Image (cartoon, grey):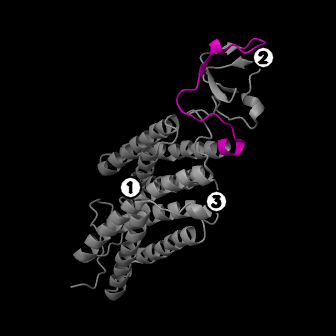
Amino acid sequence: MLKRFNKLAKISLICIYFIIIAGAVVRMTGSGMGCPDWPKCFGYYIPPTEISEIQFQPKHQYKSGHVIQYEDTFYYAKENFTSALKLDLSNWKINTQHSYNSFDVSHTWIEYINRLLTAFAGIPILILLIISLRLRKPNRHLTITSILVILGMGFEAWLGKTVVDSNLSPYKITIHMMGSFIIIALLLYAIYHSQRQKVITFPPAFKYVLISAISLTFIQVFLGTQVRQFIDEQVLNFGYKKELWLENPNLQFYIHRTLSILVILINVWLYMINKKLQLNEPLINYIMLVLGLEVLTGILMYYFNFPFATQPLHLVLSAILFGLQFYLILKTTLPKGQNISLVSTSKTS
């Protein structure tokens, strides 16, 4: 049963990363309002594929929440009804939730796929909770973690609705992103504490610097979302003239860029300690690889005018980096679960 729990936790983690990738693509393509309502899309479970589907149709059965576009404005059906030969606006409620009133099939389906991935991710997470309830006596911490993951997913779903209603409010998007990182941490905790571990005893200084490193990563992601919002505003001002996006960057950009130097130095220090003390911790090598790619995408965006896919890749790499660092923190802490065996392999004194 514990092995099944561990496998589902890993599947759930992969699903969360796919959601982050999809969300990054949504942001890159400007598809965040591709579906102007939530949880449905234009009032349908399967969204329209062409604009004629949201134009008024006589003698058509409309259901509550169905959306039509009339005179460049969205209208929502107040209730279920069959339309007459001519449009009667008394059956419709004008869109007042946000300023988005246009239809783009590519944006709609990019956002819709993002929502589908989120819905599908809920399936293994729900099964994870059910299994954890059967394990609650010997592994209560896993049950509590599973409950927190479900609550986190519920909060993220609710926040996704408010993001749409607010026409992509920047601070809500930031909270949305930070929430996904917390869910990643919870799932990594569940994975770590549901399998046998070969634990290395790290020197105290290593642990403290590692905590500083992951804290900086979290801060960098927060600042990165602010820089991304600035870029979104530049797109509105200059269109897709990428060379103008960072012509006069904001303060958050400079802080973000400067802190990246500190992030590199701290992680290099961890890498050197891992080599010097022969800890043989492979996660350090993966961290350095991901960090190198993260820096590379940052350089490409700034000096080469945002090559295709560098923005979502930069975000996804930061999520992977956070996950690797958090899992390494778990490995530096002696686990308490009875199912875990402890083996010290450190050569420190």
158 falls in the magenta region: no
Q: Name the magenta segment's main secondary structure.
A: loop
Drawn side of residue 4 relative to residue 103, left or right: left
Of the 4 image quadrants, the one containing the C terminus is bottom left
Say whether residue 191 is visible. no
> SS class of the residue under badge 2?
loop
Residue 241: numbered disc: 3
Rendering coords of residue 134 (x, y %):
38, 44
Residue 190: numbered disc: 1
Say whether residue 98 is visible. yes
Rendering coords of residue 261 (x, y %):
39, 75
Q: Which residues are magenta?
A: 83-108
Which residue corresponds to the image point at 38% horizontal and 67% vertical from the top-left?
325
User: 204 or 99: nearer the eye?
Assistant: 99
Which residue corresponds to the image point at 47% horizontal and 63% vertical from the top-left?
318
Which of pointers 1 and 2 lies earlier in the amino acid sequence? Answer: 2
10 Å neighbourhood of mark 2: few (<14), some, or many (≥20)?
few
